[in-house]
Image (cartoon, rainbow, N blue to C red):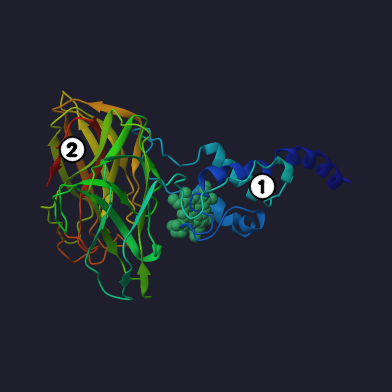
Amino acid sequence: MGRVWIIALVTPWSFGQDPTFYRDIVPILQDRCQECHRPGESGPMPLVTYPQVRPWAKAIRDAVASRKMPPWFADPCCGKFSNDRSLTRAQIDTFTKWVDAKAPMGDRADAPAPRIWPEGWNLATRDAVFSTPGFKVPAKGAVEYQYFAVPTGFKQDRWVRSVEVKPGARAVVHHVVVYIREPGSTWTRGPTKADILEVWAPGTAVETWPEGMAKLIPAGSDLVFEIHYTPTGKPAVDRTSVAVEFAKSPPAKRVLTLQMGNDRFTIPPGDRNYRVSVGGTLPNDAVLLGLFPHMHLRGKAFEFDRIRQDGQPDVLLRVSKYDFYWQLSYKLAMPLPLKKGTRLEWIGWFDNSPNNPRNPDPAAEVRYGQQSWEEMMIGFFDVAVDASVDKFKFFIR
Ligand code: HEC
């Protein structure tokens, strides 16, 4: 008798409360997961239909509760970012309740319309697409950075409002930097002061600059792809592509991707918290749009600071747990106007101790270098300047 009572009391209440797949889970998957978890993208399994999602229910609950998924590393202390894909507490609770209730399917009629994704790309309007020639990545060994110059064939200046980089053989493409090599320039290897069209690393999404802001590809420019390949044990052939969408009209502001980095450090063996910083002064008025920290396997944390008049740092972005395998860009929700003369400082921390499970060699003294067992400390940042400002370059090494 007692048992009947319990069921009668508890079931109708809890049944009404349980989230269902179609009503509560699908909207979150569409909004926060399918960008990567759909066929052809980086996520190891699609999270679209119920049969696809159901076997992963527990793994999903754990991955979202620990904030391993979706990948996002900005410390909530500082800054607001328009591409913040982290889940709200309520969304995480929805996953937990749903899985704890044995992942009910619910009524298909409650589901939103399936999200339509462009085939093969996330950028819907692709006015021009450029690809590298095929490159054979060996099964083993270190591969030097590869540079591929691809002519744009542009007869007129082009303003680009959106861009997407798409690696061909994703597993071996560690990162890509697409430079804009202006006509008359003939360099074939970095480092260079050329403007950057886009930096791609796992987790990079379509880039769209705010209204009235765009990137300039001058007539006759070439795109130079700098690609770092990391062999995986199997040979592969990669053709990486970049797609651009043109601005409808010339913008008021030109977007430049700048970098400020330090290449003169020596990280002592075993050091668990080695600090490397770099600073510079803005040579012109500029509107700060986005930030992108870059370090290698010993990278531990990264911070972008604006130094106030009183000398105190204003933290623009703090990545407390830097993850080499997820290098993300962080777009400011509110573009930040900065005056000429503003002091900027970037700080990176490195863990060269045996406690760092990714450390290739805790006994090594580590300096700047392109390979993953060497280190880098670079903060890329996007700024918008008056479209008439020409050679606004800000590259401190
Ligand atoms: C930016 C791309 C991206 C987004 C967005 C993303 N994932 Fe992932 N996810 C991946 C990749 C790549 C992996 C495999 C590598 C890894 O585990 O880090 C993965 C792995 C997973 C795993 C397996 C984890 C494990 O422990 O093995 C689960 C579960 C998962 N994702 C769920 C989700 C859910 C749920 C969302 C949305 C709330 C989401 N992911 C959003 C790219 C993404």
- Indicate if the residue with disc 2 has its beta carbon within 8 Å of ligand 1: no
In the rendering, which numbered label is found on residue 21? 1
> How many other residues sit within 10 Å of disc 2, few (<14), some (14-19) or many (≥20)?
many
Asked if ligand 1 lies within 8 A of label 1, the reply is no
Q: Do we see residue 342 in this rendering? A: yes
Q: Could you say which disc has been placed on residue 134 in the image?
A: none
Horizontal and vertical percent position of residue 208: 38, 39
Q: Nearer the viewer, residue 289 or 198?
A: 198
Report whether residue 63 is seen.
no
Residue found at the far front of this picture: 155
The answer for how far apart the CA atoms under marks 1 and 2 are is: 46 Å
Q: Residue at x 17, y 31 (%)?
A: 389
Left or right of residue 86: residue 276: left
Residue farthest to the top, as pictured = 309
- Asked whether 75 or 174 is in front, the reply is 174
Residue at the limit of the structure toward the right, as seen here: 1
Query: Which numbered circle lies on residue 345?
Result: 2
Question: In x, y percent, where is residue 262?
Answer: 14, 48
Mark 1 residue type: Phe
